[in-house]
């Protein structure tokens, strides 16, 4: 007797759409260059048509300043889609590969085939582009997709749904809304997605990997962690402080690759603090709450966690909060304990602890307390120190004398290592992670070495030994 599978309400709603996507995928329509290119064009045009709606939703959910939202969530998408469109035809071509002499005459190639139906799960901090950028990769690679936006930024989640529903038929792209904890398990349990592309916290990443394992669904996990920022004594302190202030306080520190804490060399600490203070005031004024250029904390729960960090060190700069407004001023803390929550958890807010170090070995030892960060930054003009840190710290991606900007280079793979994630995307890497590299060897029908065929004998073994050394 066949087992009767009970579907819950989420799975019941998803089931017919999932079936439609499978059918559509197997029709082969998504495979052609023309089809893929036209979907990318549609996506870009839909974003253009809805710019105002997107900006408004981001202001509602996160108080995102207009310029910041435009640059980090919208122009980012234009750049990514343009890059995909520009290179797609070239990337789609089968890639000729060499063939070992022993198999000649033959040729080998890699064919990048679409995976099928992918599930994209996105977080709240850049809620628009972190849903749309993986989707652009999925479409470029010829897949169909389900998108599950974060429920913590509901206005943006609705705009994403509206845009995608207006632009694509559900057999190509569908949106699922709701709390992750309720919607994702029934989806991963009941449907064999060909890939899950998850962006979010390390804790939920582990849950997703476990759930996906039930159906052996492969996962790309774009996670978080504590990204260190080293300020060497050779650094140009003014330029470094300006770039760090920008990178830390953009989106009020709610950026996966934000410098989480600063390791500053003891010889330059005081001068560096003065420069940080100068640049915070230059960018956000004496009263940062009045600045139109600073967003807000996403919700009260996050606000309370961040507020608790303020008591875990001496406040050098900032420290003001406003619960009603979910405002926390750009803050710099000194004398934090390496054992305390602030140095154990990802901060993900506008609080920047300073940790002083005396030697490069000591700094690396501190970094290794939270190994495999998503990002790492080195500020300094001493090549030897730069090489020391780049060689001795394992990190997803990073910068020298800058921060965050590595993620906006579409030719660089973006992703974590170890605890900060697995798999990578952006540009070619999005195409690659949403495709299966299928390998094919094609042999000619004549003229091969008869070595591998039985009957075997000692001469064959001698030849094999000569060849495979
Ligand atoms: P989160 O892990 O709480 O949520 C991410 C997504 O997972 C959401 O869509 C949510 O609905 C879903 N989800 C939550 N709990 C779930 C569960 N139990 N089962 C299934 N799905 C569940 O992350 P967040 O708070 O939205 O985002 C912040 C985190 O994301 C930070 O750690 C940050 O560093 C990380 N992040 C990483 C990147 C990156 O590119 N590596 C980018 C942005 C954010």
Image: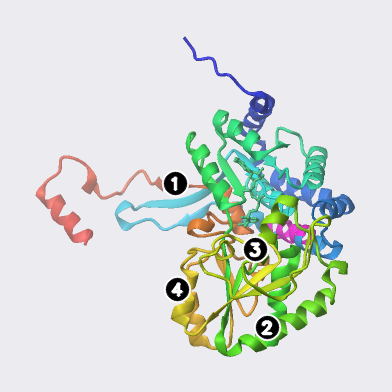
On whether ligand 1 comes within 8 Å of the CB at mark 2, the answer is no
Q: Is residue 391 left or right of residue 240?
A: left
Residue contact between numbered discs 1 and 3, judged by CB atoms under 8 Å: no
Q: Which residues are magenta?
A: 73-84
Can you give x and y, in whole percent of width and height, for residue 184 in the image? 62, 36
- At mark 1, the secondary structure is strand
Where residue 265 sits in the image (x, y, percent)? Answer: 55, 84
Residue to which mark 3 is pinned: 309
Circle nearer the viewer, 3 or 2: 3
- Asked if the residue at tag 2 contacts the one at tag 1, i.e. Cβ–Cβ closer than 8 Å, the answer is no
Image quadrant containing the C terminus: bottom left
Instruction: State whether residue 93 appears in this view.
Output: no
Mark 1 and mark 2 lie on one chain; the one further toward the N terminus is 2
Q: CA distance from mark 1 to mark 4?
A: 46 Å
**In the figure, 334 relative to 121: above or below?**
below
Give neighbour class at mark 2: few <14, some 14-19, many 20+ (Cα, 10 Å). Answer: some
Q: Distance of mark 3 from mark 4, alpha carbons?
A: 23 Å
Label annotation for residue 273: 2
Q: Nearer the viewer, residue 365 or 454?
A: 365
Residue at the spot of label 1: 440
What kind of element bears circle 3?
A: helix
């Amino acid at each position: 007797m066949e087992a009767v599978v009970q579907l819950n309400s989420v799975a019941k709603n998803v089931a017919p759409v999932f079936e439609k996507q499978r059918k559509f995928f197997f029709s082969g329509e998504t495979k052609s260059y023309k089809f893929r290119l036209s979907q990318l064009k549609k996506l870009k045009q839909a974003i253009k048509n809805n710019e105002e709606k997107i900006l408004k939703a981001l202001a509602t959910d996160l108080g995102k300043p207009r310029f910041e939202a435009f640059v980090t969530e919208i122009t980012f998408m234009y750049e990514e889609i343009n890059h995909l469109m520009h290179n797609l035809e070239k990337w789609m071509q089968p890639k000729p590969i060499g063939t070992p002499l022993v198999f000649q005459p033959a040729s080998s190639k890699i064919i990048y085939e679409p995976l099928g139906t992918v599930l994209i799960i996105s977080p709240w901090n850049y809620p628009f582009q972190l849903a749309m950028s993986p989707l652009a990769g999925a479409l470029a690679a010829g897949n169909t997709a389900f998108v599950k936006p974060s429920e913590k930024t509901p206005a943006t989640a609705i705009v994403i749904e509206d845009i995608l529903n207006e632009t694509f038929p559900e057999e190509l792209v569908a949106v699922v809304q709701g709390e992750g904890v309720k919607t994702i398990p029934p989806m991963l349990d009941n449907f064999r997605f060909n890939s899950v592309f998850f962006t979010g916290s390390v804790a939920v990443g582990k849950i997703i990997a476990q759930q996906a394992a039930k159906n052996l669904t492969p996962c790309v996990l774009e996670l978080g962690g504590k990204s260190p920022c080293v300020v060497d004594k050779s650094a140009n302190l003014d330029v470094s402080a300006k770039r760090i202030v920008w990178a830390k306080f953009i989106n009020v520190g709610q950026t996966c690759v934000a410098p989480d804490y600063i390791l500053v060399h003891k010889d330059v600490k005081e001068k560096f603090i003065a420069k940080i203070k100068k640049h915070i005031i230059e960018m956000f004024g004496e009263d940062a709450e009045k600045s139109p250029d600073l967003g807000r904390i996403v919700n009260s729960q996050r606000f309370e966690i961040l507020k608790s960090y303020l008591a875990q060190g001496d406040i050098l700069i900032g420290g003001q909060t406003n619960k009603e407004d979910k405002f926390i001023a750009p803050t710099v803390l000194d004398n934090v304990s390496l054992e305390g929550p602030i140095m154990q958890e990802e901060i993900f807010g506008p609080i920047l602890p300073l940790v002083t170090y005396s030697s490069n070995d000591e700094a690396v030892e501190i970094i290794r307390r939270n190994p495999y960060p998503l990002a790492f930054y080195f500020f300094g003009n001493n090549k030897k120190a730069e090489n020391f840190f780049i060689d001795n710290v394992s990190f997803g991606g990073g910068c020298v004398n800058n921060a965050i900007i590595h993620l906006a280079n579409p030719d660089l793979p973006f992703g974590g290592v170890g605890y900060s994630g697995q798999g990578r995307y952006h540009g070619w890497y999005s195409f690659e992670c949403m495709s299966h590299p299928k390998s094919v060897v094609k042999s000619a029908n004549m003229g091969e070495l008869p070595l591998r065929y039985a009957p075997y004998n000692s001469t064959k073994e001698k030849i094999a030994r000569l060849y495979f050394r």
